[in-house]
Amino acid sequence: MKAPTPLVLLLLALLAVSAKADIREDFERPAAFEPDIAFWTRIYTEVGTNGGLLHDRRYLGVVYEVVRFPEGAERPERRQHLDQRREVVRNRLLELARDPGIEADWAEEMRQLWGDGAGPAEFRAAADRIRFQLGQANRFRAGLERSGRWEAHIRQQMREHGVPEGMVALPHVESSFTPYARSRAGAAGMWQFTRGTGQRFMQVDHVVDERLDPWLSSRAAAQLLSHNYQVTGSWALALTAYNHGAAGVRRAVSITGSDDIARIAREYEGRRFGFASRNFYPAFLAALDIHAEPEHYFPALEPEPPVVSNGLEMPAYVPVRALADALDVAPDELRRLNPALLRPVWDGQKYVPRGYPLRLPASVDSLNPQDLLSRLDEDQLFARQAPDRYHVLRRGETLSHVADRYGVSLSQLVAINDLRNPHRVRAGQRLTLPGNDAAPVRERVPADGRYQVRPGDNLSLIAARFNTTVTRLSEINDLGNGDRIFPGQELKVATVTRSPEAAADDDGPTGEVAEAPEKAADDESPSALPTPVAAVEDGPEAMEPLADEARRDGGHLPEEQPELAADPSDYAVGVDGTIELRWGETLGHHADWLNIRTQSLRELNGLRFGDSVVAGQRLRLDFSSVEPADYESRRLAFHQAVQSRFFSQHRINGESHHEVREGDSLWNISRRHGGLPEWLLQQYNPDQNLRRIRPGDEIRVPLVERLD
């Protein structure tokens, strides 16, 4: 076969570069953002985490100096060095404000930075806008190399959800492609989902946190970005909504009267629209440029190969040790491939859940659920998860007391209860404790119809194994003395005919701890708690350090994705002091949030007793007892709680479109799609009045599945 000529090789190389560069074509690039993009390109490629740039907060093209920290400097020394350099720049700006024509090399450099139009007022204002941005070049390079593990999967997920493949660059901005990254505000994983937003598309609890799984969370990111595009209308706004929330972006469009991302970034002054939200899109465009042409910025890159693995849907709840033994796979290898499984699973307190998409090494032949069942002993297959145990805090108790009482570690309590601030626990708060008891899956009935009790058995476990109830077992075995059983005892089980579903609804361990520990001394308080680790890491210790370090140093953009980032509903008070009623709200709710009587609210709005109010109606409010910001916080907390309850049991798995037919109502459309709550349908159709739908109208409908 004839070898390709150098010209052909050159053309192939150019085509490869061109194909990769194409990922930028779907994203608008306003000329006004070019200085901002150049700034973020410098942060990502020129300066490492041993330094950064002192710059103007508003005009990123104005960079005063490159700061280099002394080698080996600890945080206090870094802070002192940075404060000194910031003060030098500030004094020079104030000196220019007093005498714009001062002759000095540094003054000439300042004037060139600001241009001929700058005068005393500009220099004085700039003195209060000096900001430091930590460099990220070393982290970005490492992220580029790590991205090879998942890039093909991310691109596939974006394609499947109608999202531009260029979104593969977003994890550079969020976490430097660090799967176990956690922020102080609770965002987690490569895509930095908050708990509230993550629960819409993934399972997020103390047993499984799919935010930490690059494969599962990439699908969720594609779903969220697709949803954001539907409710904002452009990819620039969809990306900004990823950081600022869909409701915040829609509010910015409404207030500025424009969907131009550059105009919004320059003009919008929303309360939460800070540096991160304003710069999120330019930072993404810079990351996209670098990802499209990595060798231009980082020669001699060594991208990691894609992770190759097989998948298996778990047919039952199984202890991870039994699973590793049956598959002949080291537990550490299983843990590396399944980062969504949290510490309670690996510590043996919880089982790998039924239905979980277990990822296996490529060396393990593809298995179906029945193959796995045949490899496992029947006493290692369980029908239910090991139940949780709980402890209600009493006055004076601390987390340390609870940990000592139940023989668990403090870090376990922090992780399993998702405590952002372990110092803030209160009397009456219910803490989840690691559990280690559950009901096994039905066993085959022995040929003689009898079962020999094993050590650790109880009637609840045996009943669940054979799909019956404790009452039925007691009856057919004539058990007395409190239904006590003992190892070696033979029980009749041959008459069992019930289904697993029916058995699961009957007697069984509740997991509730009825007793409270002994009372702690009255002078002990939560403030006496020892300081925990800065962040609880559930991944293997060998994984990359948490990206929270970068956030504390000013590395990643500091503002967080809001808990209700995907909710486009505006819960803010309008400039005229009114709000739009949302599904599930009543006059009583608003009166409570305002600290006034419901009748006062009726009178203010000209409503008689018995008059109803509906979603979409505007309501005038009375802020004589609370500030608008406090009212908004209470209202938002209410909706966050409602949505959290729903998404603790359900997950959005896609969407469809429904064309309204003659006789349709919102109620029967909701029932036809599994009883969707009206507020969720409204979130997918924020610009439609769902109370006034007509034949021919098209409605976006989320496809929701119930979690096991």
Image (cartoon, rainbow, N blue to C red):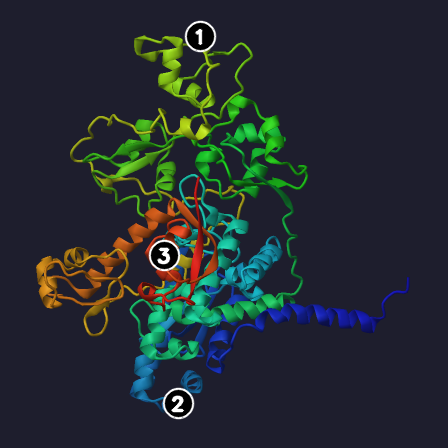
Give the quadrant of the C terminus: top left
Amino acid on which the number 3 mark rests in the picture? Leu
Q: Which mark is residue 680?
A: 3
Question: What residue is pinned by disc 1?
Answer: 489
Q: How many marks?
A: 3
Give the x, y percent position of residue 644.
Answer: 34, 49
Q: Nearer the viewer, mark 3 or mark 2?
A: 3
CA gap, disc 1 and disc 2: 99 Å
Q: Which mark is residue 272?
A: none
Give the x, y percent position of residue 530.
Answer: 30, 40
Q: Is residue 330 left or right of residue 519?
A: right
Residue 43 vertical position relative to residue 470 in the rendered view, above or below: below
Amino acid on which the number 1 mark rests in the picture? Gln
Give the x, y percent position of residue 274.
Answer: 35, 69
Residue 99 image-quadrant placement:
bottom left
Q: Secondary structure at mark 3?
A: helix
Residue 639 image-quadrant placement:
bottom left
Residue 620 vertical position relative to residue 122 in the rendered view, above or below: above
Question: What residue is pinned by disc 2?
Answer: 103
Specify whether residue 563 is in view: no
Residue 405 image-quadrant placement:
top left
Q: Secondary structure at mark 2?
A: loop
Task: Identify the residue shown where x is 36% and y is 56%.
Answer: 680
Q: Nearer the viewer, mark 3 or mark 1?
A: 3
Task: Identify the residue shown where x is 43% and y is 62%.
Answer: 700
Amino acid on which the number 2 mark rests in the picture? Glu
In the image, 20 versus 653, the foreground residue is 653
